[in-house]
Image (tube, rainbow, N blue to C red):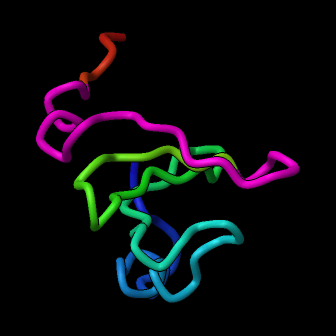
Amino acid sequence: LSLNGTPEEGDLLFHYNHRWRGIPAHVLPIARTAGADKFCLDLRSGKVLFYDPYLDEPVLYDVAPSFDAFLAALYREED
């Protein structure tokens, strides 16, 4: 998970200002998967959401009830 790319693309403010269609103003993209899907933080509720930009209609899926819960659920797969 990252917001990789150019230094500008690694900036949260850049991603907030360049939200993909369907991401409301109170939702901040915080990480990108290898496939360019986004994990977002809902600034109103504190929930972590998942955004799949390849669907016909934009949908935000609940992933975790909080950022702390999201971090606690992350793990590294062993090789």
In the rendered image, the quadrant that contains the C terminus is top left
Point 44% across, 50% down: residue: 39
Against 79, residue 38 (above or below) is: below
Q: Residue at x 66, y 71 (%)?
A: 20
Q: Position of residue 68 (x, y in %)?
A: 11, 41
Range of magenta residues: 53-74
Is residue 77 a member of the stretch shown in magenta? no
In the rendered image, the residue lying farthest to the top is: 78
Q: Is residue 77 above or below residue 57?
A: above
Residue lying at 53% horizontally and 53% vertically, measured from the top left:
38
Residue 2 on image: x %, y %: 39, 56
Residue furthest right as drawn: 56
Seen in the image, is 57 located left or right of residue 42? right
Give yes or no for residue 54 being in the magenta stretch. yes
Q: Give the quarter of the image for residue 66.
A: top left
What x and y, as percent, mark residue 59? Answer: 66, 48
Tell me where residue 49 appears, x and y as whole percent: 43, 46
